[in-house]
Image (cartoon, rainbow, N blue to C red):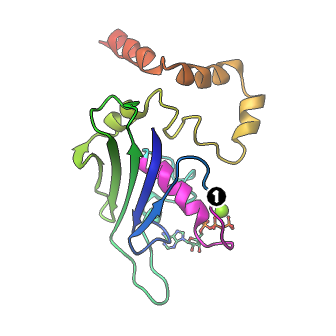
């Protein structure tokens, strides 16, 4: 399983549809200050269900929608999709590619889609649980995260190992069962 492609349209500085193809292995993004490098990682977090606007470096969720420049007017919708290769069936869905998309309209209306089918944020979270991908997953290491892992409590560190071991979904199911 790996991230093959990112498609952005109307997300932050990416007004036009932009496709970023990724190789299996290491990809480096280089560019001048303010050219949109961090906006790409914001986009990845956002599609995976990030709800904290601060993590996305905005003041309100609407700030992820392209808000215009002196030459171009603002757009009404932001859309990002992540194309994952699922040749190894790491995602428990019988498709060799999984496309996860999120859309947000200025009206506040928002939607998530898995392979074009509308779904809930809960479905997105469940799909990525135990894969290491996800807003809290260990594959997204933001600035300062290493420090917090090293200096964090053993409970916090345990969560990382539990995700790597693939038992988070069972703990979640247990919690839900106990609630019923
Ligand atoms: P640095 O090297 O300084 O870290 P960077 O390449 O990571 O820079 P970003 O932070 O990704 O740059 O991009 C910042 C740019 O994105 C700014 O020019 C900002 O105006 C633009 N931007 C952010 N949100 C929006 C938005 N909603 N609409 C239009 N442009 C936006
Ligand atoms: Mg940056």
Residue 140 lies in the magenta stretch: no
User: Furthest-left residue in view?
Assistant: 117
Q: Is residue 151 left or right of residue 11?
A: right
Residue depicted at 54% across the width and 35% down the height: 137
Q: Closest to the observer: 114 or 145?
A: 114
Give the percent coordinates (x, y) of residue 38. Answer: 60, 60
* Residue plotted at (48% across, 38% down): 134
SS label for mark 1: loop
Note whether 164 is above or below 178 in the view shown: below
The residue lying furthest to the bottom in this view is: 71
Q: Residue 168, relative to residue 18: is it above or below? A: above
Q: Quadrant of residue 172?
A: top left
Residue 74: x and y, percent?
39, 78
| The image quadrant in which ligand 1 is located | bottom right
Q: Is residue 74 visible?
A: yes
Looking at the image, residue 113 sits to the left or right of residue 142; the answer is left
Question: Which quarter of the rendered picture does the N terminus lie within?
Answer: top left
Q: Residue at the location (45% across, 74% down)? A: 67
Q: Which residues are magenta?
A: 29-47
Measured as percent of width and height from the top left, residue 109 is found at 28, 56
Q: Quadrant of residue 162?
A: top right
Q: What residue is pinned by disc 1?
A: 28
Q: Position of residue 164 (x, y in %)?
A: 56, 24
């Amino acid at each position: 399983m790996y991230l093959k492609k990112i498609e952005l349209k109307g997300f932050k500085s990416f007004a036009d549809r932009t496709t970023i193809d990724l190789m299996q292995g290491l990809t480096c993004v280089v560019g001048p200050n303010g050219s949109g490098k961090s906006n790409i990682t914001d986009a990845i977090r956002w599609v995976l269900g990030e709800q904290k606007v601060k993590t996305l470096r905005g003041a309100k969720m609407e700030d992820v929608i392209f808000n215009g420049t002196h030459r171009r007017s603002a757009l009404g919708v932001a859309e990002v999709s992540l194309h994952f290769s699922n040749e190894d069936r790491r995602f428990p869905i019988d498709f060799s590619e999984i496309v996860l998309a999120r859309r947000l309209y200025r009206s506040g209306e928002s939607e998530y889609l898995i392979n074009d089918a509308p779904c809930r944020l809960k479905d997105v979270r469940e799909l990525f649980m135990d894969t290491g991908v996800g807003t809290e997953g260990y594959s997204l290491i933001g600035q300062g995260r290493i420090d917090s892992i090293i200096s964090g409590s053993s409970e916090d560190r345990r969560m990382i190992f539990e995700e790597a071991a693939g038992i988070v979904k069972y703990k979640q199911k247990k919690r839900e069962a106990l609630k019923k």
